[in-house]
Amino acid sequence: MSAKFTILEELVRPVVEGLEFEFWGMEYLSQGKDSVLRIFIETDAEKGIDVEDCARVSRQVSSILDVEDPITGEYHLEVSSPGLDRPLFSLTQYQAYVGSIVSLRLRVPFDGRRKFKGQLVGVENDDIVVRVDQEEYLLPIDLIDKGNIVPQF
């Protein structure tokens, strides 16, 4: 995890949690003028996350980021719920979705490939266990660039 990402999370997480939402995770995509800071929030409430919840978090986070100014240059701030194809960021989140179908993209190739789509079998230490075509792979979480639940309808 980069130092900038760590600083961003240290600024954003307390704001989200102070508004009584769960900080699900965050993505920062540095692309010049089209850079995006995407924050995912969750709640235990029956109603889920609505547009007003996202707007409220966005206003508060934006105020903190304007004062602290951790991102140089222009960027877009997005706040949303994780949705059905929710991204997975932590070992705890992966553990909660054991049995689900996941799509994983790695930072570097593992066993000759960077993309894996299969059933999440479990979590062992700092590794994610995924079954693809009857073969199990033990993937270090540090190698995962992006992990998502694949919605089953």
Image (spheres, rainbow, N blue to C red):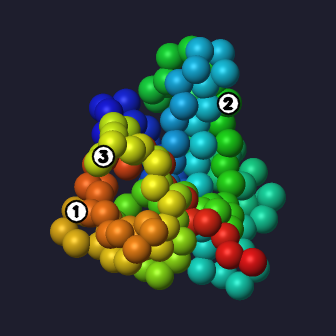
Residue 80 picture quarter: bottom right
Quadrant (top left/top right/bottom left/bottom right) for the N terminus = top left
Q: Secondary structure at mark 2?
A: strand
Report the disc number at residue 126.
1
* Dot placed on the residue nearer the N-terminal end, 2 or 3: 2
Amino acid type for the residue under numbered disc 2: His
Amino acid type for the residue under numbered disc 1: Asp
- Report, in whole angstroms, how far the alpha carbon at label 1 lies from the one at label 2: 32 Å
Residue 71 position, x and y percent, is 49, 24
Return the residue at label 3.
110
Return the residue at label 2.
76
- The answer to the question of whether label 1 and label 2 lie on touching residues, with beta carbons closer than 8 A, is no
- Report, in whole angstroms, how far the alpha carbon at label 2 lies from the one at label 3: 33 Å
| Crowd tier of the residue under label 3, counting other residues whose Cα lies within 10 Å: few below 14, some 14–19, many 20 or above | some
Residue 35 relative to residue 95: left or right: right
As drawn, the residue found furthest toward the left would be 125
Seen in the picture, residue 138 relative to 47 is either above or below; the reply is above
As drawn, the residue found furthest toward the bottom would be 46
Which residue occupies the foreground of this view, 126 or 19? Answer: 126
